[in-house]
Amino acid sequence: MVSRLLALAPLLSPVALGQRSELGATDFIRFGCSQLVIERADPLVSPGLNPSPHTHQIVGGNAFNITMDPAHLDPAQTATCTSCIYTEDNSNYWTASLYFRSPENGTFKRVPQMANGRLNGTLLEQEGGLTVYYMRPFSGTNKKTVAFKPGFRMFAGDPALRTKAGTYPGICHRCLSAAERITGGSGAPCDRNDTPELPNKPCPGGIRATVIFPSCWDGVNLDSPDHRSHVAYAPTSPALAGDKCPASHPVRIPQVMYEIMFNTTQFNNPEYWKDGKQPLVYSFGDPTGYGAHGDYLFGWKGDALQRGMDALGKDCGSEDCTRVLKIQSGKDAIACTKPQQAKEDVGTGTWLKELPGGMPITYS
Ligand SMILES: *[C@@H]1O[C@H](CO)[C@@H](O)[C@H](O)[C@H]1NC(C)=O
Ligand SMILES: *[C@@H]1O[C@H](CO)[C@@H](O)[C@H](O)[C@H]1NC(C)=O
Ligand SMILES: *[C@@H]1O[C@H](CO)[C@@H](O)[C@H](O)[C@H]1NC(C)=O
Ligand SMILES: *[C@@H]1O[C@H](CO)[C@@H](O)[C@H](O)[C@H]1NC(C)=O
Protein backbone atom coordinates (compact mmCIF):
# COMPACT_ATOMS: atom_id res chain seq x y z
CA MET A 1 0.00 0.00 0.00
CA VAL A 2 2.67 2.44 1.04
CA SER A 3 4.61 1.86 -2.14
CA ARG A 4 1.50 2.36 -4.25
CA LEU A 5 0.76 5.66 -2.57
CA LEU A 6 4.31 6.82 -3.00
CA ALA A 7 4.16 5.82 -6.63
CA LEU A 8 1.14 8.06 -7.03
CA ALA A 9 2.92 11.07 -5.65
CA PRO A 10 4.33 12.43 -8.90
CA LEU A 11 0.98 11.91 -10.60
CA LEU A 12 -0.69 14.38 -8.30
CA SER A 13 1.99 17.04 -8.55
CA PRO A 14 0.84 20.47 -9.77
CA VAL A 15 2.47 19.83 -13.13
CA ALA A 16 0.75 16.50 -13.63
CA LEU A 17 -2.57 18.01 -12.55
CA GLY A 18 -2.50 20.36 -15.50
CA GLN A 19 -1.83 17.69 -18.10
CA ARG A 20 -4.75 15.68 -19.29
CA SER A 21 -2.55 13.04 -20.84
CA GLU A 22 -0.92 12.15 -17.49
CA LEU A 23 -2.26 8.91 -16.13
CA GLY A 24 -2.99 10.37 -12.67
CA ALA A 25 -4.76 13.46 -13.93
CA THR A 26 -7.21 11.40 -15.94
CA ASP A 27 -8.56 9.76 -12.81
CA PHE A 28 -10.26 12.72 -11.18
CA ILE A 29 -12.25 15.90 -11.66
CA ARG A 30 -11.01 18.73 -9.50
CA PHE A 31 -12.55 22.17 -9.04
CA GLY A 32 -12.71 25.16 -6.74
CA CYS A 33 -15.72 26.40 -4.80
CA SER A 34 -15.92 29.81 -3.18
CA GLN A 35 -17.40 30.37 0.28
CA LEU A 36 -21.22 30.32 0.38
CA VAL A 37 -21.57 31.18 4.08
CA ILE A 38 -19.90 30.56 7.44
CA GLU A 39 -22.53 29.78 10.04
CA ARG A 40 -23.84 27.34 12.62
CA ALA A 41 -25.99 25.15 10.39
CA ASP A 42 -25.83 21.42 9.77
CA PRO A 43 -28.69 19.90 7.75
CA LEU A 44 -27.01 16.49 7.85
CA VAL A 45 -26.17 15.95 11.53
CA SER A 46 -28.60 18.36 13.22
CA PRO A 47 -31.39 19.14 10.75
CA GLY A 48 -33.83 21.80 11.92
CA LEU A 49 -31.51 23.19 14.59
CA ASN A 50 -30.93 26.92 14.16
CA PRO A 51 -28.27 27.48 15.21
CA SER A 52 -26.57 24.09 15.19
CA PRO A 53 -23.87 23.41 17.82
CA HIS A 54 -20.72 24.46 15.94
CA THR A 55 -19.50 26.71 13.12
CA HIS A 56 -19.17 25.37 9.59
CA GLN A 57 -17.63 26.76 6.42
CA ILE A 58 -20.00 25.86 3.59
CA VAL A 59 -19.71 25.91 -0.21
CA GLY A 60 -21.92 24.88 -3.14
CA GLY A 61 -25.54 25.51 -4.12
CA ASN A 62 -27.56 28.25 -2.46
CA ALA A 63 -30.39 25.87 -1.57
CA PHE A 64 -28.33 25.15 1.55
CA ASN A 65 -30.63 25.41 4.55
CA ILE A 66 -31.12 24.37 8.19
CA THR A 67 -33.27 21.48 7.01
CA MET A 68 -32.71 19.71 3.70
CA ASP A 69 -35.13 16.79 3.85
CA PRO A 70 -34.73 14.97 0.52
CA ALA A 71 -38.49 14.34 0.48
CA HIS A 72 -39.12 18.08 0.22
CA LEU A 73 -35.97 19.61 -1.22
CA ASP A 74 -33.86 18.69 -4.21
CA PRO A 75 -30.94 21.15 -4.28
CA ALA A 76 -30.37 20.36 -7.95
CA GLN A 77 -33.75 21.95 -8.70
CA THR A 78 -34.01 24.51 -5.90
CA ALA A 79 -30.65 26.28 -5.97
CA THR A 80 -30.47 29.37 -8.15
CA CYS A 81 -26.67 29.61 -8.06
CA THR A 82 -23.63 27.66 -6.94
CA SER A 83 -20.31 28.85 -5.56
CA CYS A 84 -18.57 26.01 -7.41
CA ILE A 85 -17.17 26.44 -10.91
CA TYR A 86 -19.44 23.83 -12.55
CA THR A 87 -22.94 25.25 -12.82
CA GLU A 88 -24.64 21.85 -12.79
CA ASP A 89 -23.26 21.19 -9.31
CA ASN A 90 -25.65 22.39 -6.62
CA SER A 91 -24.22 19.98 -4.04
CA ASN A 92 -23.19 21.26 -0.63
CA TYR A 93 -19.81 20.60 0.89
CA TRP A 94 -18.89 21.70 4.41
CA THR A 95 -16.35 21.28 7.19
CA ALA A 96 -15.73 22.70 10.66
CA SER A 97 -14.09 26.09 11.02
CA LEU A 98 -10.71 26.39 12.76
CA TYR A 99 -9.94 28.87 15.56
CA PHE A 100 -6.83 30.30 17.14
CA ARG A 101 -7.06 30.43 20.94
CA SER A 102 -4.75 33.08 22.32
CA PRO A 103 -2.36 31.50 24.82
CA GLU A 104 -2.12 35.00 26.33
CA ASN A 105 -5.75 35.62 27.20
CA GLY A 106 -7.81 32.66 26.01
CA THR A 107 -9.88 34.54 23.41
CA PHE A 108 -10.64 33.06 19.97
CA LYS A 109 -10.28 34.29 16.39
CA ARG A 110 -11.28 32.29 13.32
CA VAL A 111 -8.35 31.15 11.18
CA PRO A 112 -9.05 32.63 7.75
CA GLN A 113 -9.13 30.32 4.79
CA MET A 114 -7.24 31.05 1.58
CA ALA A 115 -7.48 29.93 -2.00
CA ASN A 116 -5.81 26.71 -3.07
CA GLY A 117 -3.79 28.38 -5.77
CA ARG A 118 -3.03 25.41 -7.98
CA LEU A 119 -4.18 26.00 -11.51
CA ASN A 120 -7.23 28.26 -11.31
CA GLY A 121 -7.88 28.15 -7.59
CA THR A 122 -6.89 31.73 -6.87
CA LEU A 123 -9.37 32.90 -9.49
CA LEU A 124 -12.42 31.75 -7.62
CA GLU A 125 -11.87 30.53 -4.09
CA GLN A 126 -12.59 33.85 -2.43
CA GLU A 127 -12.96 33.83 1.34
CA GLY A 128 -11.20 30.49 1.14
CA GLY A 129 -13.85 28.11 0.03
CA LEU A 130 -12.54 24.66 -0.68
CA THR A 131 -11.35 22.43 -3.47
CA VAL A 132 -13.43 19.41 -4.39
CA TYR A 133 -12.26 16.24 -6.10
CA TYR A 134 -14.34 13.40 -7.54
CA MET A 135 -12.01 10.46 -8.13
CA ARG A 136 -12.28 7.08 -9.79
CA PRO A 137 -9.99 4.16 -8.86
CA PHE A 138 -6.35 4.94 -9.51
CA SER A 139 -5.59 1.23 -9.84
CA GLY A 140 -7.30 -1.82 -11.33
CA THR A 141 -8.86 -2.29 -14.74
CA ASN A 142 -12.51 -1.49 -14.01
CA LYS A 143 -12.63 2.23 -13.31
CA LYS A 144 -16.39 2.67 -13.67
CA THR A 145 -18.10 4.60 -10.87
CA VAL A 146 -21.82 5.05 -10.26
CA ALA A 147 -22.78 8.66 -9.50
CA PHE A 148 -24.86 9.41 -6.39
CA LYS A 149 -28.65 9.47 -6.52
CA PRO A 150 -30.75 12.53 -5.59
CA GLY A 151 -31.07 12.67 -1.80
CA PHE A 152 -27.68 11.03 -1.20
CA ARG A 153 -25.58 12.40 1.64
CA MET A 154 -22.72 11.20 3.82
CA PHE A 155 -20.27 12.08 6.55
CA ALA A 156 -16.54 11.33 6.83
CA GLY A 157 -14.50 11.28 10.02
CA ASP A 158 -15.42 11.14 13.70
CA PRO A 159 -15.71 14.42 15.64
CA ALA A 160 -15.44 12.54 18.96
CA LEU A 161 -11.88 11.34 18.30
CA ARG A 162 -9.13 12.95 20.35
CA THR A 163 -6.42 10.29 19.90
CA LYS A 164 -4.73 8.80 16.88
CA ALA A 165 -6.33 5.40 17.46
CA GLY A 166 -9.27 4.99 15.13
CA THR A 167 -8.39 7.88 12.85
CA TYR A 168 -8.84 7.22 9.16
CA PRO A 169 -5.75 7.64 6.96
CA GLY A 170 -7.69 9.78 4.48
CA ILE A 171 -8.29 12.64 6.93
CA CYS A 172 -5.16 14.64 7.59
CA HIS A 173 -3.34 17.95 7.89
CA ARG A 174 -0.25 19.18 6.11
CA CYS A 175 2.09 21.86 7.44
CA LEU A 176 2.95 23.86 4.32
CA SER A 177 6.29 25.52 3.69
CA ALA A 178 6.33 29.12 2.43
CA ALA A 179 6.94 27.83 -1.10
CA GLU A 180 3.79 25.69 -0.90
CA ARG A 181 1.44 28.54 0.01
CA ILE A 182 0.21 28.86 -3.57
CA THR A 183 0.41 25.28 -4.80
CA GLY A 184 -1.07 23.82 -1.63
CA GLY A 185 1.62 21.13 -1.52
CA SER A 186 2.25 18.30 -3.95
CA GLY A 187 2.40 14.52 -3.64
CA ALA A 188 -0.38 12.12 -2.77
CA PRO A 189 -3.06 13.28 -0.32
CA CYS A 190 -2.46 12.11 3.25
CA ASP A 191 0.99 10.77 2.49
CA ARG A 192 3.98 10.80 4.82
CA ASN A 193 4.04 14.61 4.75
CA ASP A 194 0.63 14.73 6.45
CA THR A 195 -0.50 14.00 10.00
CA PRO A 196 -3.92 13.07 11.37
CA GLU A 197 -3.43 15.68 14.11
CA LEU A 198 -3.00 19.42 13.67
CA PRO A 199 0.66 20.38 13.11
CA ASN A 200 2.58 21.10 16.34
CA LYS A 201 4.78 23.78 14.81
CA PRO A 202 4.06 27.03 12.97
CA CYS A 203 3.48 26.45 9.24
CA PRO A 204 4.88 29.29 7.11
CA GLY A 205 2.63 28.43 4.14
CA GLY A 206 -0.45 27.66 6.24
CA ILE A 207 -2.20 24.34 6.90
CA ARG A 208 -3.92 22.20 4.30
CA ALA A 209 -6.64 19.93 5.67
CA THR A 210 -7.74 16.94 3.56
CA VAL A 211 -10.95 14.94 3.96
CA ILE A 212 -11.34 11.83 1.79
CA PHE A 213 -14.79 10.20 1.76
CA PRO A 214 -15.56 6.48 1.28
CA SER A 215 -15.67 5.04 -2.24
CA CYS A 216 -18.16 2.17 -1.76
CA TRP A 217 -21.95 2.28 -1.23
CA ASP A 218 -24.48 -0.30 -0.06
CA GLY A 219 -26.50 0.41 -3.21
CA VAL A 220 -29.71 0.98 -1.26
CA ASN A 221 -29.64 3.71 1.38
CA LEU A 222 -29.25 7.38 0.54
CA ASP A 223 -28.31 8.05 4.19
CA SER A 224 -27.99 6.13 7.46
CA PRO A 225 -28.54 7.06 11.12
CA ASP A 226 -24.81 7.76 11.67
CA HIS A 227 -24.53 9.11 8.07
CA ARG A 228 -21.59 6.75 7.58
CA SER A 229 -22.67 3.12 7.59
CA HIS A 230 -24.34 3.18 4.15
CA VAL A 231 -20.86 3.84 2.71
CA ALA A 232 -17.49 2.15 3.26
CA TYR A 233 -13.85 2.61 2.41
CA ALA A 234 -12.38 0.09 -0.02
CA PRO A 235 -10.50 -2.35 2.22
CA THR A 236 -7.49 -2.67 -0.06
CA SER A 237 -6.74 1.03 -0.20
CA PRO A 238 -6.92 3.01 3.00
CA ALA A 239 -6.68 6.45 1.42
CA LEU A 240 -7.43 6.52 -2.28
CA ALA A 241 -9.96 4.48 -4.20
CA GLY A 242 -8.93 1.03 -5.32
CA ASP A 243 -11.18 -0.93 -7.64
CA LYS A 244 -12.49 -3.44 -5.06
CA CYS A 245 -15.43 -2.77 -2.77
CA PRO A 246 -16.50 -5.01 0.15
CA ALA A 247 -19.48 -7.35 -0.38
CA SER A 248 -21.50 -5.31 2.14
CA HIS A 249 -21.01 -2.15 0.04
CA PRO A 250 -20.60 -3.44 -3.50
CA VAL A 251 -21.32 -0.28 -5.51
CA ARG A 252 -18.31 1.83 -6.41
CA ILE A 253 -19.13 5.54 -6.14
CA PRO A 254 -16.95 8.50 -7.07
CA GLN A 255 -14.55 9.10 -4.20
CA VAL A 256 -15.06 12.64 -2.94
CA MET A 257 -12.14 14.57 -1.47
CA TYR A 258 -11.94 18.08 0.01
CA GLU A 259 -8.86 20.24 0.39
CA ILE A 260 -9.14 23.20 2.75
CA MET A 261 -6.41 25.81 3.07
CA PHE A 262 -6.04 27.69 6.37
CA ASN A 263 -3.99 30.87 6.47
CA THR A 264 -2.22 30.70 9.84
CA THR A 265 0.22 33.55 9.07
CA GLN A 266 -1.01 35.92 11.79
CA PHE A 267 -0.77 33.15 14.41
CA ASN A 268 2.73 31.89 13.61
CA ASN A 269 4.52 33.55 16.53
CA PRO A 270 6.79 30.72 17.79
CA GLU A 271 5.83 31.69 21.35
CA TYR A 272 2.40 30.15 20.63
CA TRP A 273 3.87 26.84 19.49
CA LYS A 274 6.24 25.87 22.28
CA ASP A 275 6.93 22.51 23.95
CA GLY A 276 4.88 20.50 21.46
CA LYS A 277 1.75 22.60 22.14
CA GLN A 278 -0.20 24.28 19.37
CA PRO A 279 -2.83 27.03 19.72
CA LEU A 280 -5.51 25.93 17.23
CA VAL A 281 -8.87 24.37 18.01
CA TYR A 282 -11.65 23.21 15.69
CA SER A 283 -15.08 24.81 16.11
CA PHE A 284 -16.46 21.63 17.69
CA GLY A 285 -13.99 21.94 20.57
CA ASP A 286 -11.24 19.69 19.24
CA PRO A 287 -7.74 20.98 20.09
CA THR A 288 -6.06 17.88 18.54
CA GLY A 289 -7.35 17.69 14.95
CA TYR A 290 -8.06 13.96 15.24
CA GLY A 291 -11.79 14.73 15.07
CA ALA A 292 -11.57 16.53 11.71
CA HIS A 293 -14.53 15.62 9.49
CA GLY A 294 -16.53 16.59 6.44
CA ASP A 295 -20.16 16.62 5.30
CA TYR A 296 -21.42 15.94 1.78
CA LEU A 297 -24.88 16.49 0.31
CA PHE A 298 -25.31 15.50 -3.33
CA GLY A 299 -26.97 18.03 -5.63
CA TRP A 300 -25.71 17.61 -9.21
CA LYS A 301 -28.34 18.19 -11.90
CA GLY A 302 -29.50 15.18 -13.90
CA ASP A 303 -26.69 12.95 -15.09
CA ALA A 304 -24.01 15.67 -15.08
CA LEU A 305 -21.74 14.00 -12.52
CA GLN A 306 -22.05 10.64 -14.26
CA ARG A 307 -21.20 12.28 -17.58
CA GLY A 308 -18.11 13.86 -16.04
CA MET A 309 -16.92 10.62 -14.44
CA ASP A 310 -17.55 8.60 -17.61
CA ALA A 311 -15.51 11.10 -19.63
CA LEU A 312 -12.42 10.74 -17.41
CA GLY A 313 -9.42 9.68 -19.46
CA LYS A 314 -11.14 10.90 -22.63
CA ASP A 315 -12.65 14.37 -22.62
CA CYS A 316 -12.18 15.13 -18.98
CA GLY A 317 -9.47 15.11 -16.35
CA SER A 318 -8.18 17.27 -13.52
CA GLU A 319 -9.57 20.81 -14.02
CA ASP A 320 -10.15 20.31 -17.71
CA CYS A 321 -13.70 19.02 -18.01
CA THR A 322 -15.26 21.93 -19.85
CA ARG A 323 -16.11 19.87 -22.94
CA VAL A 324 -18.46 17.81 -20.79
CA LEU A 325 -19.60 20.04 -17.91
CA LYS A 326 -20.94 23.59 -18.00
CA ILE A 327 -18.64 26.12 -16.39
CA GLN A 328 -19.15 29.62 -14.99
CA SER A 329 -16.62 32.38 -14.41
CA GLY A 330 -14.82 32.61 -11.08
CA LYS A 331 -16.53 35.99 -10.60
CA ASP A 332 -19.97 34.39 -10.85
CA ALA A 333 -19.01 31.59 -8.45
CA ILE A 334 -17.75 34.18 -5.95
CA ALA A 335 -21.01 36.14 -6.33
CA CYS A 336 -23.03 33.15 -5.08
CA THR A 337 -23.29 33.65 -1.33
CA LYS A 338 -25.99 33.36 1.35
CA PRO A 339 -26.70 35.42 4.45
CA GLN A 340 -26.23 33.61 7.78
CA GLN A 341 -29.48 32.11 9.02
CA ALA A 342 -28.54 32.56 12.67
CA LYS A 343 -26.79 35.89 12.53
CA GLU A 344 -23.72 35.98 14.78
CA ASP A 345 -20.09 36.96 14.88
CA VAL A 346 -18.15 33.80 14.03
CA GLY A 347 -14.80 35.41 14.81
CA THR A 348 -13.93 36.77 11.39
CA GLY A 349 -11.26 39.29 12.28
CA THR A 350 -12.65 39.75 15.78
CA TRP A 351 -11.81 38.13 19.10
CA LEU A 352 -14.48 36.02 20.78
CA LYS A 353 -14.66 35.17 24.48
CA GLU A 354 -15.72 31.64 23.62
CA LEU A 355 -16.16 29.42 20.57
CA PRO A 356 -19.48 30.18 18.79
CA GLY A 357 -22.27 28.41 20.61
CA GLY A 358 -20.13 28.23 23.76
CA MET A 359 -18.70 24.95 22.47
CA PRO A 360 -16.48 23.52 25.24
CA ILE A 361 -12.97 22.33 24.43
CA THR A 362 -12.62 18.63 25.12
CA TYR A 363 -9.46 16.57 25.36
CA SER A 364 -11.02 13.11 25.42
C1 LIG B 1 -35.08 27.55 4.20
O1 LIG B 1 -36.20 26.70 4.29
C2 LIG B 1 -37.38 27.36 4.73
C3 LIG B 1 -38.43 26.29 4.98
O2 LIG B 1 -38.58 25.47 3.88
C4 LIG B 1 -37.80 28.36 3.67
O3 LIG B 1 -38.97 29.03 4.08
C5 LIG B 1 -36.67 29.35 3.47
O4 LIG B 1 -36.99 30.21 2.41
C6 LIG B 1 -35.37 28.65 3.18
N1 LIG B 1 -34.33 29.65 3.29
C7 LIG B 1 -33.44 29.84 2.36
C8 LIG B 1 -32.51 30.97 2.66
O5 LIG B 1 -33.35 29.18 1.34
C1 LIG C 1 -5.70 38.57 23.35
O1 LIG C 1 -4.49 38.13 22.78
C2 LIG C 1 -4.29 38.41 21.41
C3 LIG C 1 -2.95 37.88 20.98
O2 LIG C 1 -2.75 36.57 21.41
C4 LIG C 1 -4.37 39.89 21.16
O3 LIG C 1 -4.24 40.16 19.79
C5 LIG C 1 -5.71 40.41 21.65
O4 LIG C 1 -5.78 41.79 21.47
C6 LIG C 1 -5.87 40.07 23.13
N1 LIG C 1 -7.19 40.48 23.57
C7 LIG C 1 -7.36 41.11 24.74
C8 LIG C 1 -8.78 41.45 25.09
O5 LIG C 1 -6.43 41.39 25.47
C1 LIG D 1 -2.57 35.36 4.92
O1 LIG D 1 -2.68 36.18 6.06
C2 LIG D 1 -1.76 37.27 6.05
C3 LIG D 1 -1.83 37.94 7.43
O2 LIG D 1 -3.14 38.28 7.77
C4 LIG D 1 -2.11 38.19 4.90
O3 LIG D 1 -1.23 39.27 4.87
C5 LIG D 1 -1.98 37.40 3.60
O4 LIG D 1 -2.40 38.20 2.51
C6 LIG D 1 -2.84 36.15 3.64
N1 LIG D 1 -2.50 35.32 2.48
C7 LIG D 1 -3.41 34.78 1.68
C8 LIG D 1 -2.88 33.99 0.55
O5 LIG D 1 -4.60 34.91 1.87
C1 LIG E 1 -8.77 28.60 -15.95
O1 LIG E 1 -8.35 29.89 -16.29
C2 LIG E 1 -8.26 30.10 -17.69
C3 LIG E 1 -7.63 31.46 -17.90
O2 LIG E 1 -8.30 32.44 -17.13
C4 LIG E 1 -9.64 29.94 -18.31
O3 LIG E 1 -9.56 30.08 -19.71
C5 LIG E 1 -10.18 28.54 -18.00
O4 LIG E 1 -11.52 28.42 -18.45
C6 LIG E 1 -10.16 28.32 -16.50
N1 LIG E 1 -10.57 26.96 -16.23
C7 LIG E 1 -11.27 26.64 -15.12
C8 LIG E 1 -11.55 25.20 -14.93
O5 LIG E 1 -11.62 27.46 -14.31
Image: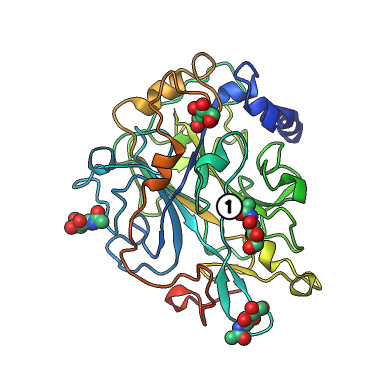
Q: Quadrant of ligand 3?
A: bottom right
Q: Residue at x 30, y 64 (%)?
A: 341
> Eyeballing the image, is 233 above or below 110?
above
Viewer-nearest residue: 349 or 231: 349
**Counting other residues with Cα less than 10 Å from the Cα at mark 1, is it few (<14), some (14-19), or many (20 or more)?**
many
Count of picture labels? 1
Q: Residue at coordinates 63% horizontally, 21% vertically from top-left?
A: 19
Query: From the viewer's perspective, is residue 352 above or below residue 219?
Result: below
Q: Is residue 96 visible?
A: yes
Where 17 falls versus 81 (above or below)? above
Q: Label 1: state its secondary structure.
A: loop
The answer to whether the beta carbon of the residue marked 1 is less than 8 Å from any atom of ligand 3 is yes
Query: In the image, what residue occupies the spot 74% across and 64% down?
Result: 200
- Depth check: give the residue in front, 280 or 8: 280
Q: Quadrant of residue 110?
A: bottom right
Q: In the orientation shown, which residue stands out farthest toward the left?
A: 72
Position in image of residue 246 (x %, y %): 51, 33
> What residue is pinned by disc 1?
114
- The quadrant the C terminus occupies is bottom right
Q: Residue furthest front?
A: 331
Q: Most extreme residue toward the right, as rendered?
A: 275
Percent across and percent down for residue 35 are 45, 51
Q: Amino acid at mark 1?
A: Met
Q: Does the image show residue 262? A: no
Q: Would residue 32 appear left or right of 167 to someone viewing this image?
A: left
Residue 198 in the image, given as x and y percentages of width and height: 67, 60
Where's residue 301, x and y in %?
30, 32
Which residue is nearer to you in this view: 302 or 20?
A: 20
Quadrant occupied by the N terminus: top right
For residue 102, which quarter of the picture?
bottom right
User: Hey, which residue is sitting farthest top in the picture?
Assistant: 314
